[in-house]
């Protein structure tokens, strides 16, 4: 995470995958996240919102709906 922040030089850092998002959230390094929901079943995986800890609330910032994908953006509130 430190290397990503240094490389970004003040810009946003994008994280891909539930495990790293969970780690960043638990460490207090995650401000917002976006989920892009596409109606395709891929099988198993890590649940994104598991293990974030007690007291974490989500503030909905954006919903963009289309026939093929729904974009959801949230801010984490502690």
Image (tube, rainbow, N blue to C red):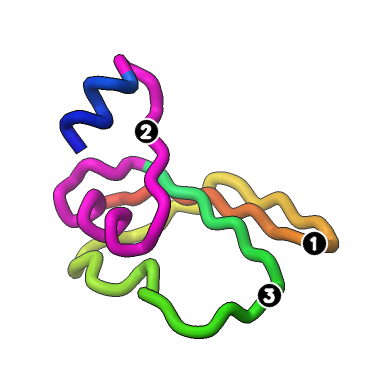
> Which mark sits nearer the N-terminus, 2 or 3?
2
Residue occupying image coordinates x 37% and y 33%: 13
Q: Nearer the viewer, mark 1 or mark 3?
A: 3
Question: Dot 3: few (<14), some (14–19), or many (≥20) neighbours within 10 Å?
Answer: few
Front residue (pair 12, 74): 12
Which of the numbered marks, if any, corresponds to residue 49? none
**Residue picked out by circle 3:** 40
Residue occupying image coordinates x 16% and y 32%: 2
The answer to whether marks 2 and 1 mark residues whose Cβ atoms lie closer than 8 Å is no
**Residue picked out by circle 1:** 68
**Residue picked out by circle 2:** 13
* Callout 2 secondary element: loop
Query: Going by the picture, which residue comes out furthest to the bottom?
Result: 43
Q: Position of residue 1 (x, y in %)?
A: 20, 38
28 shown above or below 58: above
Marks 2 and 3 sit apart, C-alpha to C-alpha, by 26 Å
Question: Dot 1: few (<14), some (14–19), or many (≥20) neighbours within 10 Å?
Answer: few
Range covered by the magenta-colored residues: 9-31
Marks 2 and 1 sit apart, C-alpha to C-alpha, by 26 Å
The answer to whether marks 1 and 3 mark residues whose Cβ atoms lie closer than 8 Å is no
For the stretch drawn in magenta, the main secondary structure is loop
Residue occupying image coordinates x 33% and y 21%: 8
Verify whether residue 76 appears in magenta: no
Question: Dot 2: few (<14), some (14–19), or many (≥20) neighbours within 10 Å?
Answer: few
Quarter of the image for residue 58 reads bottom left
20 shown above or below 7: below
């Amino acid at each position: 995470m430190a290397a990503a922040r240094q490389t970004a030089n003040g810009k946003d850092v994008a994280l891909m995958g539930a495990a790293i998002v969970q780690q960043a959230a638990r460490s207090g390094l995650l401000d917002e996240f976006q989920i892009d929901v596409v109606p395709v079943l891929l099988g198993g995986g890590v649940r994104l919102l598991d293990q974030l800890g007690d007291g974490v609330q989500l503030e909905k910032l954006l919903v963009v709906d289309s026939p093929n994908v729904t974009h959801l953006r949230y801010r984490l509130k502690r």
